Amino acid sequence: MNRTAWRTIQYALLTSGAVVMLLPLWWMVVVSLETPERAGSAVGGGGEMTLWPQTPQWTNYPQALREMGSVQWNGFLNALANSVVITTLVVVATVLSSSLVGFAFARVRFRGRRTLFLIMLGTMMLPGQVTLIPLFIFFRSLNWIDSLLPLIVPAFFGNAFFIFMYRQFIAQIPESLIEAAKVDGYSLLSIWWRIILPLCAPVTAICAVFTFIFVWNDFMGPLVYLHSDEQATLAVALNSFRNQYGGLEDVHLLMAASLVTMIPCIVLFVAAQRHFIEGLARGAVKG
């Protein structure tokens, strides 16, 4: 088999895989633009589903957002603002804290470094459900319940998985570069901020994308810590919308609301995919 034929087979397989992966998303788009009758019959299995809606109902989107915001636009905008604030702060805090701790484990010599690193790795074995109740009791003692603080403050203490990624990546940076910076009078914090962090752009892209997607779609955390409607995030608002409008007659609105909440994740991944793929290709978690 010549090279051209092999490349053709590769592209065909990749295209087929992309179509399979994108088909559910396209199906959601089609259903979100259908009339209530056609959408309900298609989802319920009683109707024929086409690749494009016969008469696109663009009004489904503003209607879905109004319903998700308890009939008022400010309800949706308030949930959107809460999600943006929480996600932005958590992403920034996770990147800064994880890269700083990873730099310390990789390049700073101190007693007990290996032991602390192993303990940190051990925390990755604990599922979030195990620490949920102790954390809730702790945050309640601080009077942080029904505020954004329980969802934001823990991010400033780093994430074990991303600390491990940064540590492995920074360990591959030549020691001579750091020694030269020390000779020039740079402190450890200056070396981390001016030299290490810019070089870790591929890992930072992975950390930012994964953290953004997790926090943006997080439902359990806001459900446990946020009790008032004013503090609700988009995930909680979407779940309330599903409980109220989850029937087949409203499935077009549910699909429209779900697609709107997915847009930031898609945009971020497309914008950061170059650094994201580069980080994976360079082996950001390679030992």
Image: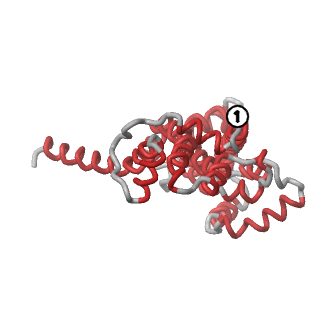
Residue extending farthest to the top is: 184
Instruction: Using the image, determine if residue 222 lies above or below residue 15.
Output: below
Residue nearest the observer in this picture, 168 or 264: 264
The location of residue 158, given as percent across then percent down, is 69, 51
Q: Quadrant of residue 182?
A: top right
Residue nearest the observer in this picture, 93 or 133: 133
Instruction: Using the image, determine if residue 156 lies above or below residue 119.
Output: above
Residue shown at 61% from the left, 68% from the top: 125
Residue extending farthest to the front is: 37
Instruction: Using the image, determine if residue 40 lies above or below residue 55.
Output: below
Residue shown at 86% from the left, 60% from the top: 140
Q: Circle 1 sits in a helix, a strand or a loop, which is it?
A: helix
Residue shown at 61% from the left, 34% from the top: 195
The location of residue 187, given as percent across then percent down, is 73, 36
- Left or right of 90? Residue 177 is left
The location of residue 98, given as percent across then percent down, is 66, 48
Q: Quadrant of residue 204?
A: top right
The location of residue 70, given as percent across then percent down, is 70, 44
Residue nearest the observer in this picture, 224 or 274: 224
Residue shown at 40% from the left, 53% from the top: 42
Looking at the image, can residue 12 be seen? Answer: yes
Residue under label 1, please give it.
190
In this figure, what is the number of numbered marks?
A: 1
Q: Amino acid at mark 1?
A: Ser
